[in-house]
Image (cartoon, grey):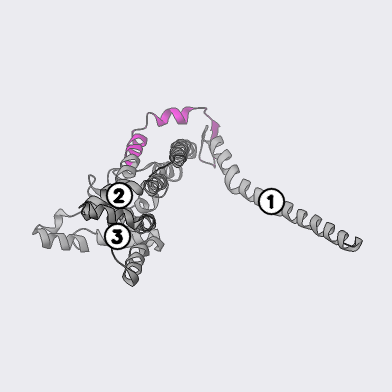
Amino acid sequence: MSTAETRFLQKRKVTSSKFILIVSLVVLGYYTLIGIWPFIYNVFISFRKTDLLTVNKFIGLSNYRFIFKDPVFWQSLWQNAFYLVVMVSLGIVTSLIFAGLISKTRGVMKKIYTAMFFAPVVTSMVAVSLVWSLLYYPKVGVFASFLSGILGMSRDNFIFLQNPSTALFWIIIVDVWRDSGIKTVIFLAGMDEIPDSLYETAQIDGAGNLRQFFKITVPLLRPQLIFVGAVYSINAIVRVYVYIYMMTGSPPGGPANSTMILQLHMYLSAFYGQQFGYGASISMMMFVILIGLVIMEVRSFQQKWEY
């Protein structure tokens, strides 16, 4: 290789190194600006009483001590836990059933059914919330009309989101409906990897479809089940805010705080009550809960499965 070619390659290497360095610094600066700095500032104001305009004083751990005395916080935490358990359990069961039924189809019909179930996943959460609010509308809504006709009861009995004892459950149904498609696709992918020879052997032994499903399909889908359960447990803490905010009126979280969850309590405390320090302390409690869920998720993925 000539001297000129060597110099050219060295110059090109230096230029590439400078470009990589500049891009790295830009990415690091962007991440610091939108990720690290807001977190640090949130920790800072969680120790203060502030409305970000007139009041701004250090109060130490008072916000955190008030959390443990706040009945709305504990109600929100319980309702978050209820939402997590019911949404994840119901979503896994329904998606397993759908995936099992779709796996029995072949060719074009299998693709059509998969696309039909996946379509709600790519639909805007705001649009889904508005449409289901109309479906749940008391007296004149589609569900109230349908159920009153089927059961022969007055439409006044079907108030859905206006009933404090059932409002959160009906919002869970919306979340399960929207996300069942992606869970179904994940389970379908897992089912496609299960060898047909296992089912053929089970048929020879006289096992029916239902027994094959519970003895072969479900045990071999354990990695997918753990993945779906872990990811949607985190979503149950973070993402449910949109449905409740859009579907429960103004201020959201009603009726009688029956749909209040931690994220919404944080928002209302900060922006409705002008207690930004207390809202920041609630967000830090949510951060601790999410860290715990992430640790459980990481440990679950470190397991080794043998079949």
Residue highlighted by disc 1 = 24
Give how far apart the Cα atoms at labels 1 and 2 are.
48 Å
Q: Residue furthest bottom?
A: 108
Q: Position of residue 120 (x, y in %)?
A: 36, 62
Q: Which residue is mark 2?
A: 216
Residue 194, above or below 42: below
- Asked whether the beta carbons under mark 3 and mark 2 sit within 8 Å of each other, the answer is no
Q: Residue furthest left?
A: 152
Q: Amino acid at mark 2?
A: Ile
Q: Residue at x 37, y 63 (%)?
A: 118
Secondary element under disc 2, as helix, strand or loop, is: helix
6, 181: nearer the viewer: 6
Mark 3, residue position? 132
In this rendering, position of residue 187 left or right of residue 15: left
Instruction: Kindly identify the amino acid type of the residue bearing the numbered disc 3.
Output: Trp
Residue 75: in magenta span: yes
Residue 267 versus residue 211: which sits nearer the camera?
Answer: 211
Task: Mark 1: give few (<14), some (14-19) or many (20+) Cα within 10 Å.
Answer: few
Q: Is residue 163 visible to us here? A: yes
Q: Residue 234 at x, y = what percent?
A: 42, 45
The crowd level at tag 2 (other Cα within 10 Å; few <14, some 14-19, many 20+) is some
